[in-house]
Amino acid sequence: MPASLWPAPVATDPVRATVALPGSKSMTNRALLLAALADGPNTVRRALRSRDADLMAAALRSLGAGLTSSGEDASGADWHVVPGPVRGGVSIDCGLAGTVMRFVPPMAALAAEEVAFDGDPQARVRPMGVLLGALRSLGAEVTGDALPFTVGGPLAGGEVTVDASGSSQVVSGLLLSAARFDKGLTLRHSGPPVPSMPHIEMTVTMLRAAGVAVDDTEPDVWRIEPGPITAHDVTVEPDLSNAAPFLAAAMVTGGTVTIPGWPEVTTQPGDRLRELLARMGATVDRTPRGLTVSGGAGVRGIDADLRDVGELTPTIAALAALADSPSTLRGIAHLRGHETDRLAALVTEISRLGGDARETEDGLTVRPRPLRAGVFHSYADHRMATAGAVIGLAVPGVQVEDIATTAKTLPEFARMWARMLGDGR
Ligand SMILES: O=C(O)C1=C[C@@H](OP(=O)(O)O)[C@@H](O)[C@H](O)C1
Ligand SMILES: C=C(OP(=O)(O)O)C(=O)O
């Protein structure tokens, strides 16, 4: 059955809105996994409820943790987590979630019995070989090099070298469970630069908050001492990457959008939106009410290295397609292994609407041209769907295929978008 088409609303007036965002996917899924490996019960507050977060919760339950949620509303829920011995003999559905397919297998390798992993058809082509190779060389029994695969422990830990240039999640996944390996872990990266470094900082910061000794003084080397992961309550920050399309709406319509609760200090890569959107012409103000972005003088093209913040690319590319000068986005070859090949998908969909977007070896060039009505395909990628919504604000007749795919990290997206535009239905 063809996925449904969502008529992207056109903004007839500058948007003026305050948009409260649910919790960060990346922090929620790290916090849940650390809570399940901790030395006592703990609570993850304001956790995201979305497909990726719920897949993580289900995976942790399968591996023996007790999880119950309370206080659930549109902004998320509190998860009460009671750790248990990690048990195998189970199957885990990763969906299309990188955080589940890369973070859970090292934890599963703590169990003596085998754990089977599978996911969506598109997940089967996401890069897994480096992580599974590392688990093998640390002593786990692994069958397969991509989904579906099985992992059997127990693995002792020790030293391993990986090429994590394809995904930072290889590093984060190994570090998150490493304190529970008998020998801990010394992890070295060797190869082209690791992308999404803020996400590795997020991992290290959250491990330290749980009392884990992490030595990251040498670049591209991480040493984790074996020891307990201390039970403690965590409050998840709003998802700053999911702020991107809403803040972009302020720019495209010459309006103003405020995101309440923007953290003063954060490891989330979405914090770089402050600088990127300012370079594209926005006025960015941080006030006690939150982060406010105002547009006005059109959108300027940008030449930017997005290696650290690759997940912001679909929104930046959508803005670039509506800008008044060309853009070059660099450092993002690894986006070919995201939910879909995002470089190919962005080029195809922007071109379909009459735009001029081209793939380079490590990114995209976008030259603004007048755009026309058409279908913007999502490829089961939440950030492609929201990029289509951004373009649709300014281009009448854009229909986003499968807007429901935003449920991966923001199930309320379509309703929040309508509310932002002053249409509460
Ligand atoms: O660790 C994480 O939570 C993430 C790391 C990044 O992955 P890559 O390094 O594969 O880009 C990012 O793109 C993804 O959305 C979330
Ligand atoms: C790359 C992303 O997700 P995942 O965690 O599935 O890798 C993303 O959300 O942009």
Image (cartoon, helix red, strand yellow):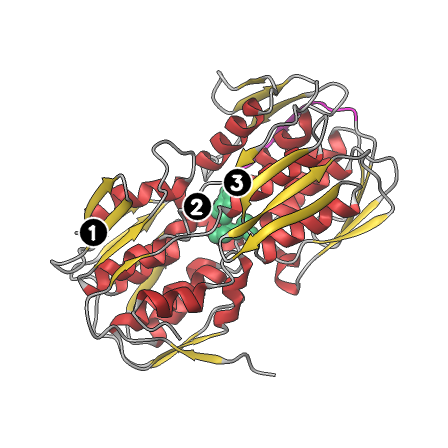
Residue 181 pos. (x, y %): 74, 24
Q: Nearer the viewer, mark 2 or mark 3?
A: 2
Q: Is residue 234 magenta?
A: no
Asked if labels 2 and 1 touch by Cβ distance under 8 angstroms, the answer is no
Residue type highlighted by circle 3: Met
Q: Residue at x 29, y 70 (%)?
A: 422
Residue 196 pos. (x, y %): 45, 39
Q: From the image, tell me which residue sits under label 1.
A: 280
44 to 383, vertically: above or below: above
Asked if labels 1 and 3 touch by Cβ distance under 8 angstroms, the answer is no
Q: Is residue 213 left or right of residue 419?
A: right
Residue 295 makes an appearance in the image: yes
Q: Indicate the secondary structure of the residue bearing disc 2.
A: loop
Q: Residue at x 43, y 45 (%)?
A: 238
Q: Would you identify the image quadrant in which residue 352 lies? A: bottom left
Mark 3 burial class by Cα count in 10 Å: few <14, some 14-19, many 20+: many
Q: Indicate the secondary structure of the residue bearing disc 1.
A: loop
- Say which mark, if any, is on residue 238: 2
Residue 219 pos. (x, y %): 47, 21
Q: From the image, tell me which residue sits under label 3.
A: 27
Residue type highlighted by circle 2: Pro
CA distance separating discs 2 and 3? 9 Å
Q: Is residue 247 left or right of residue 189?
A: left
Q: Is residue 132 left or right of residue 209?
A: right
Q: Residue at x 55, y 41 (%)?
A: 45
- What are the residue bounds of the magenta stretch? 156-168
CA distance separating discs 1 and 2? 23 Å
Residue 147 pos. (x, y %): 71, 54
Q: Nearer the viewer, mark 1 or mark 2?
A: 2
Q: Indicate the secondary structure of the residue bearing disc 3.
A: helix
Residue 167 makes an appearance in the image: no
